[in-house]
Image: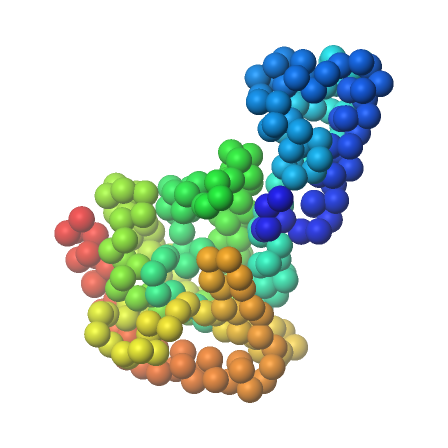
Amino acid sequence: MASGESQQAQQNWRYCGGQIKLWREEAGVSRQALAGEAGYDGEYVKSMECGRRRPTLRLLQIADQLCGARGKLVAAHEFLKPEPFPARSQEYMAIEAEAIAVHDYSLALIPGLLQTKAYAQALISESCPPLDDETVGERVRARLARQEALTRRTKTVYGFVVHEAALKTRVGGRAAMRQQLDHLLDVGALRNVSVQVLPFGKCGGLALNGSFILLETADHERFAYVEGPETSVLHSDAGKVSDLAQVHGMIRMQALGVEESAAFIGKVAEEL
């Protein structure tokens, strides 16, 4: 079962899969017959019936027709839509949506709030284990929807420090990366957004320890969010948040200024 899904989502998978099996057995339809009609492998259907995989809309439609469920199985799809964010990041997303200040340091990737559709699509579609197309589409959509806050919440301060490494990864290919760099320049021109570049060789080990985000809420609560490939941690402890804030301060002091950064990004784009 996908570790990125919430417990509620996994329960929905199990319940829906169980219903498919009950309707199938009641109608005298074998699993192999259902799989063949849907164009799936029998083990793949078994995984969906057991709740290890999210039942697909196609399987629900075929099972509904074969078993005479008259729309009852297809109706379950409403409760099986992919979650817009992995379960481990949902608490962070809720705080980010209401924050009055967001300060992001990114080492190897362009921050999610600054990604183009092509860049986000390339990253999310290359997840391992692979995500199904519907989940990829929903997560790309959700990532782009988050970005609306940059122009809608004009009183929120967004500060981004992006390591030079993230500008040179060519995620999605040369054309997609060029578009991404141009987008950084456009977003960086917003009055509540700053984009700075930390060049190679600056800030030593501190810069290489990884990405993190600092947030402040309207109630002046402060959080720090650290995310890795498989795990993420939202810190609320004042001491830990303070430690990361000091690291961020050191990194930002050695980063290029906003205007210098824009020129730097433009030069990297031209050299692609």
Rendered location of residue 13, percent (x, y)? 71, 38
Rendered location of residue 201, percent (x, y)? 21, 74
Residue 181 in sight: yes
As drawn, 32 above or below 43: above
Q: Is residue 138 left or right of residue 112?
A: right
Q: Given the current orientation, which residue lies at the most extreme left position?
A: 271
Instruction: Report the residue at 44% width, 41% height from top.
Output: 125
Q: How many marks?
A: 0
Q: Between residues 214 and 145, which one lies in front from this camera angle?
A: 214
The quarter holding residue 187 reads bottom left
Q: Between residues 38 and 71, which one lies in front from this camera angle?
A: 38
Quadrant into which the N terminus falls: top right
Rendered location of residue 227, percent (x, y)? 49, 64
Instruction: Report the residue at 65% width, 77% height from top.
Output: 219
The quarter holding residue 73 reads top right
Instruction: Report the residue at 21% width, 63% height from top.
Output: 264
